[in-house]
Image (tube, rainbow, N blue to C red):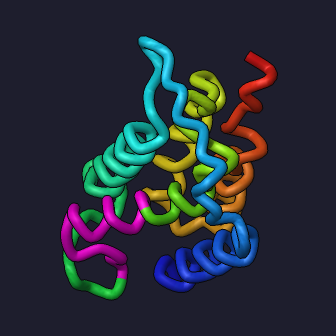
Amino acid sequence: MQKCLWASLATAIMVGTVGCDDASDTVNDVLPGEESREARIEQISEAACDRYADTEAGCPGYGTTDDQTYATEEDCERDFADRAGELWPATECGSGQINDSRYDVCEERAKAAACSEGFFDAIAALDECSAENVCSDPADK
């Protein structure tokens, strides 16, 4: 079930980002104290995968059974980083454009989705973590 859920989520992300990978428009203005896009991608993948590994909280943990999507932490982090990179294209979420408070909400949703097989958790995470919700226009700063 969880593997199908993540495949569906990944497909929805891919469909929503086709044609959005023109890195020539990337904004790289990171002010002191702001996290870069790359740092946020790494941060969310680590947080989600730490949660996924928490078997005491009822999460699947790493392994190769049918209930476990990821065999290793590296597999998990790579997958979540790939998905975050697709959700936050550099053209919309260049460094310094990720809103801190909206990112925090997204991270909590990603952790819930990582531990859940629930379709609604995945949809909520996709919505909360969309570029539209997490990224800010540099003109708004």
Percent x, y of residue 96: 55, 28
Give me the residue at 68% from left, 37% from top.
135
Quarter that holds the C terminus: top right
- What is the chief secondary structure element of the magenta stretch? helix
Whether residue 77 is situated above or below residue 93 in the rendered picture: below
Q: Front-most of 9 and 65?
A: 9
Percent x, y of residue 116: 50, 61
The question of residue 126 being in magenta is answered with no
Residue 114: quadrant of the picture: bottom left
Toward the front, the furthest residue is 24
Q: Front-most of 102 and 33?
A: 33
Left or right of 33, for residue 46: left
Instruction: State the extent of the magenta-drawn residues as a range.
Output: 67-81
Give me the residue at 69% from left, 46% from top.
92
Q: Front-most of 111 and 87?
A: 87
Give me the residue at 58% from left, 50% from top.
90
Q: Would you say residue 57 is visible in this rendering?
A: no
